[in-house]
Structure formats: C-alpha cells, structure tokens
Image: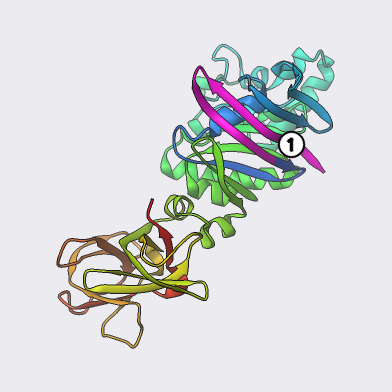
Amino acid sequence: MIELLVENLHLTYGDNPVLKGVSMELKRGEVVSLLGPSGSGKTTLLRAVAGLEKPTEGTIFIGKNKVYDGTPRSEIPAEERNLGLVFQSYALWPHKTVFENVAYPLKLRKVATAEIAQRVQAVLDQLGLGHLGKRHPYQLSGGQQQRVAIGRALVYNPPVILLDEPLSNLDARLREEARVFLRELIIKLGLSALMVTHDQNEAMAISDRILLLNNGKIEQQGTPQEMYATPKTLFTAEFMGSNNRLHGKVTEVREGKARIEGRGWALWGLAGEGVQPGQEGTAIIRVERVILRDQATESHNQLELPLLTSMYLGDRWEYLFRTSGDDFVIRAYGNEVGDPLHCYLELPENHVWIFPKP
C-alpha cells in the first residue's frame, strides 16, 4: 500500500524554481531517503509534504487523502496531515520533561490522561528511555535528545514519519550508533519514513530506496545497491561513493563499452548514456575498485605510476599516485607498496564508467 504519493510537484521562491516536477511514492513499511547536495530541493520537498511550504503545482496524497492539489488549489494545513516530524534541531521544549515532550502530541489530540501515560511510557521503553521520563532535555546526551524527538513523532502512530537530517547534530561515533538504532527501530515498528540527508553513507545504511535530487529534479532513484553499483549519469556516479576521475577523449564505443584516452594512457569502461566517439569524456571508478599490483599484468586497463604519498587509515592505507604530466591523481587502498617508483594500478573495465563530459 502506498502511504505517500507526490505527483509533478513544483515549488518556486519568487523567480527561483526549487522543485521542478518531482514525483515519488513511499510504500508502507518502506524507508526512502532524499539525498543530494545543498540547494538540490530535498529539504523543500520534505517541508512541502509536511505542509510547511506551499507548492505551486502538483498533488500530494497521504494514504487516500489528497492533502495538496495545485489545480484547483486546495490544501490541508500541516497540523491536520497527521505526520510525525523529527527536525534537525530536535526542537524539544527545554522547560518540559522528557515525558511531557513526548506526551504533547497526545494532549493536543485530547487523549485521556490514563492512555497518555500508558502510550508515552511504552514509547520511552521502546527507545531505551523508560527511566529518563522525569529529566529535562539539558540533562540528556545528544543521542538521547534525538530519541526523545523520535518518540514524540511516533507516540500517536502517524502513517508517515518525516526526518530532516535527524543524525547531523551527533558526533561521528554517535552517528554510526544512532543509524543502527534508527534502522532497527524502523524495521521493528514497521514505519514508513521519508528522510532528508546529505550523508550518502547514512542514506545507504538506513534506506530501502534513495532518491537523488539535483537542481530540483530526481536525477536517479533505486535501492542503495543500484545507486552505488549502476549509476545512470555522471552526477550520480560522482555523488555516490569515493571516486577517481580521469578526463580524456572517447575514441571508440561498441557493445555497451567505450574507450577513453589521455596523454599516455587509455582505458575501457562501461559506456554511459549518450557517449559518442570523438567526445570529451570523464571516466569514473570507485577508489576501492582500483587494484594495486607489484608487477605488470596482461590487463588492458593498467597504469604504471609512481607513488606520491600515503595516508594510514587504521584498517588499510590510502595511496596517491600522480601522472608525470600532473593530468590527474589516482587513489587506491592497500596494505603494502613494493617499489614506490613503479606501481601498477589495475582499473577493471566493468567498474569503470565513461560519461560525456558536461
């Protein structure tokens, strides 16, 4: 069942179009992340669904209820859309206790006092906060405050929960722990969630599907595996993962593959849409897909380069190699370099994507 449906949504600030015909759906029990750079429209889309921004065209359905229609213009106000909201800042009332913060949505809905007590305690127990109901937000850690904000959004069982950068205020270690907890909670409760994030690792860890926005439009959507392993455009390939980029001229295209050449090097890779011989092109390969070898092999996709420098990452080293003409830098992971003056980097052609240069 579809819990949220957005069709051909447009939104303009003055003369600046922010959303340019976005369509998406969220199914029951599904987590969808809106991913993209700053200014791509992801937060604006979330706020339009919540009723906090006013679109100029399109429709929004929550379940079977049409909450926005651009023709003729009609909309249901934010407070009547029955959505759970978790803001980036958590937006907790500092003068209220944890219990009172979580209970507030139920009080607004005039739920009986006994039922409020039962439902709030049940949510706090699920979130591991059952013993903290009498504390105030300033007495909690950042991770605990984030859980209170989630509890407040969940307590009245909304059909859809909206999360706006819910983990961004946490430090790196807490953020990793929190995304594990959030994914576990979503699965356990069978939530339907729409989440905004700029962190691709967060999106991939938590989501069933990712919608990558670019300049107010959906560039590509799919499962985390599809978005990472089969990018359809140069923008998607560059945004997902940690990458090497090589610029050159496309010299041949055949059977779904393309050949790109630069000064003293040539590579084969998977041909992106629109690639034609004679074009300037960009080859992309994930850093972890580059294979560092001690000696030359028969691979057509191999570069011999000197080591420029190395960085210790704990479980591995990251090595940087630069061409003699300073055309580009190649990065690769490994654990040992034999001869730093003669390193052989293999770029498997099934992991190289070649796109037209924009």
On the picture, is 257 further left or further right than 19?
A: left
- Estimate the x, y position of residue 261 in percent, counting from the top left: 30, 70
- Estimate the x, y position of residue 212 in percent, counting from the top left: 54, 45
| Residue nearest the observer in this picture, 154 or 65 | 65
Name the residue at 36% across, 65% down. Answer: 278
Toward which corner of the image does residue 286 lie, by quadrant?
Answer: bottom left
| Residue nearest the observer in this picture, 165 or 351 | 351
Q: Can residue 237 be found in the magenta stretch?
A: no
Q: Is residue 308 above or below residue 183?
A: below
On the picture, is 338 further left or further right than 13?
A: left
Does residue 75 show up?
no
- Estimate the x, y position of residue 171 in percent, counting from the top left: 42, 38
Query: Which part of the image, by quadrant, shows the N terminus?
Result: top right
For the image, the number of numbered tags is 1
Toward which corner of the image does residue 122 lie, by quadrant?
Answer: top right
| Residue nearest the observer in this picture, 216 or 34 | 216
Toward which corner of the image does residue 73 lie, by quadrant?
Answer: top right
Name the residue at 58% across, 21% down. Answer: 135
Q: Is residue 156 above or below residue 260?
A: above
- SS class, disc 1: strand
Query: Badge 1: how crowded within 10 Å, few (<14), some, or many (20+)?
Result: some
Residue located beneath label 1 in the image: 5
Which amino acid type corresponds to the residue marked 1 in the rendered image?
Leu
Name the residue at 34% across, 88% down. Answer: 298
State the predominant SS element of the stretch in magenta.
strand
Q: Which residues are magenta?
A: 1-24
Q: Can residue 10 be found in the magenta stretch?
A: yes
Does residue 173 show up?
yes
On the picture, is 188 further left or further right than 85?
A: right
